[in-house]
Image (cartoon, helix red, strand yellow):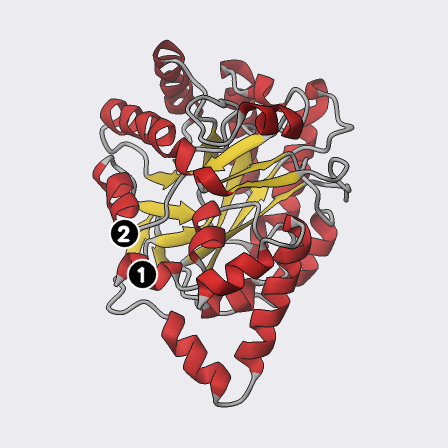
Amino acid sequence: MYNLLKSLLFLLPPEVAHEFALKSLRIVLRTPILGSWVRQSFQPVNAKPVVVAGITFPNAVGLAAGFDKNAKWLHLLKDLGFGHVEIGTVTPLPQPGNPAPRLFRLPQDYALINRMGFNNDGIEAVVERLKNRPAGLVVGGNIGKNKITPNEQAAQDYTKAFEAIYDHVDYIVVNISSPNTPGLRDLQEDEFISDLFEKLQTLRAERRIWKPIFLKIAPDFQQSQIHELIQTIRRAKVDGVIATNTTIDRSNLNTSKSKIEKIGAGGLSGRPVYEASNTILGFLAMELGGEFPLIGVGGVFTKEDFDGKVSRGASLVQVYTGFIYMGPRIVRKILS
């Protein structure tokens, strides 16, 4: 059934299809009797809770940041069986993101290329929605800097977003690894990470409730760079690492080179990033030896993909592109 629906949805522009599919699914789930039956069909069977960084997750499969940027679909996503949803990336000020078209499908590769550019409604609007979040769903807040903010002032954006969202999410993620905000990945260096986490940890110490602060990293590191990053993670006393974001690599794709060149810049997600993200995940697990929890993301479509992340040290696994290609029963299929 979903393969048929997907063929129709893929006739629409990706962003239009995204909104249409979610709105349509919400209508179905709100329909008496039918909605209850459909909702039950999405729930994973015998899913086991997982405790990570002091948080009890209903199950180990979550939805990565970027899908629900503005915390609009949390009730729906809980009904689909996700154990956690990471909203954002959210910036202090609202911003439209990059000009469209900015999201592209690569069906031959089961992949997407996006250059969304942190399009979001801003931290104030998102916090208002989070006040009505569903009970029983773990929600993470992925924060970033505004495009207009120079890197020299980036820490101010992160601390402002952190303070605003802290009381309304279960964990916070510092995103300095998106390839779609100019200069953002330049912040993946020791001084900035150490200084920023020190600031955020000081702000956290003033709060009544302790919540973990995670770091999301890119997959485009050389082995020597990973060793340096691991030392930085230790020094910064990061509470956990999300590995990984999208890649700028375009090697070994089935999609024609001419089409890839026509699409242009952006972060690649889906099947092609699976091995690269697993390599980073494996290095982190080997070097850190269980010091920090790891969340694996990148190219997860099936139970085998999920198991591959877990075997390399991931305590939790997130999906994104796999959700689009495999459909709303992906959590049930992975966990059952």
Residue of label 1: 333
Q: Quadrant of residue 40?
A: bottom left
Question: Between marks 1 and 2, how big is the CA–CA gap?
Answer: 7 Å
Say left or right for 246 vs 60: right
The quadrant of the image that shows the C terminus is bottom left
Residue at 26% x, 22% y: name it.
287
As rendered, which of 109 and 201 lies closer to the eye? 109
Q: Is residue 244 above or below residue 123?
A: above
User: 10 Å neighbourhood of mark 1: few (<14), some, or many (≥20)?
Assistant: some
Residue of label 2: 303
The quadrant of the image that shows the N terminus is bottom left
Residue 124, x across and y down, in percent: 73, 52
The amino acid at mark 1 is Lys
The amino acid at mark 2 is Lys
Residue at 46% x, 52% y: name it.
325
Mark closer to the chain start, 1 or 2: 2
Residue 222, x across and y down, in percent: 39, 13
Callout 1: helix, strand or loop?
Answer: helix
- Residue 296 seen in render: yes
As rendered, which of 302 and 172 lies closer to the eye? 302
Residue at 57% x, 65% y: name it.
133
Q: Quadrant of residue 221?
A: top left
Residue at 54% x, 68% y: name it.
75
Residue 33, x across and y down, in percent: 48, 90
Say left or right for 273 vs 161: left
As rendered, which of 15 and 223 lies closer to the eye? 15
Residue 48, x across and y down, in percent: 25, 62
Is there a contact, CB below 8 Å, between mark 1 and mark 2? yes
How many numbered marks have been drawn onto this rendered protein structure? 2
Say left or right for 114 vs 324: right
